[in-house]
Image (cartoon, rainbow, N blue to C red):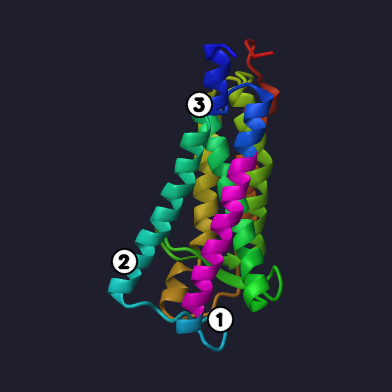
Amino acid sequence: MDDHDAAADLTGGPRSGASARAIAAVVAFGIAFGWLEAAVVVYLRELLYPQGFDFPLRLLRPDLAVIELAREASTLVMLAAVGVLGARTGWGRFGLFALAFGVWDLVYYLGLWIALGWPASLGTWDVLFLIPGVWTGPVWTAALIAALLVAFGVPLYVRSERGALGSVRWWHWALAVLSLTLLLAAFLANHSLVLQQGVPVDFPAGIYFAGLAAGIAAAVDLIWLHPSRHAAA
């Protein structure tokens, strides 16, 4: 094995064996981390919602809210660190981050269903995130995004590591910003309502799907429609 092959193995580079090992390791991490997240939430719900989670929310004390926000931020750092350690290119790292995030979120809900029998259906409402505000929506909205992150994260990682990814153009960034803006607007639409002890019933599905469409368009164009002319064999 020459120096280039050794480097490829260590970084999850263009060799297919190294890529497969990196993907398998990230999936294993996502499964374990998703179960860990579910276990933490089981404990939290036992303390805050002994009769079962439902709206209206029971707001945390300010000091506990700060700790919970820090925990969520730490979760993102851990998922991002997996991508950084597993790939050698910037977009390869983002692809592994997306894969880890998607698997983690899907296993999280599976873990809650196994432990608590919750959610009762994919239409059950949940608090999805707390940064930069209270994200709420039916479980299917989070699960669909998680599945898409897995579906696009793997080819993004593989093609980037093999040098087959095309150049990122301004419209990719524009579509990405539009997607994030629309998705944030959808998930934060009930922020004020739930903080005022209200019960959310309306989710802006049109805004949500428009955000998904923008993100999917950017990903498809970047990953498949404009490949690099210098792709590794």
Asked if marks 1 and 2 touch (Cβ < 8 Å), the reply is no
Q: Front-most of 181 and 148? A: 148
Q: Front-most of 102 and 215? A: 102
Residue type, label 3: Arg
Q: Nearer the viewer, mark 1 or mark 2?
A: 2
Residue at 52% in and 13% down:
3
| Quarter the C terminus occupies | top right
Looking at marks 2 and 3 on the same chain, the residue that comes earlier in the sequence is marked by 2
Q: CA distance from mark 1 to mark 2?
A: 22 Å
Residue bounds of the magenta highlight: 24-45
Residue occupied by mark 2: 66
Residue at 66% in and 19% down:
227
Q: Nearer the viewer, mark 2 or mark 3?
A: 3
227 left or right of 64? right
Residue occupied by mark 3: 88
Looking at marks 1 and 2 on the same chain, the residue that comes earlier in the sequence is marked by 1
Q: Residues within 10 Å of mark 1 (few under 14, many from 20)?
A: some
Residue type, label 2: Val
Residue type, label 1: Asp
Most distant residue in the front direction: 1
Element class at badge 3: loop
Residue occupied by mark 1: 54
Q: CA distance from mark 2 to mark 3?
A: 34 Å
Q: Front-most of 15 and 53? A: 15
**Residue 135 screen position, x and y as percent:** 49, 63
Number of numbered discs overlaid on the protein picture: 3
Q: Is residue 218 visible?
A: no
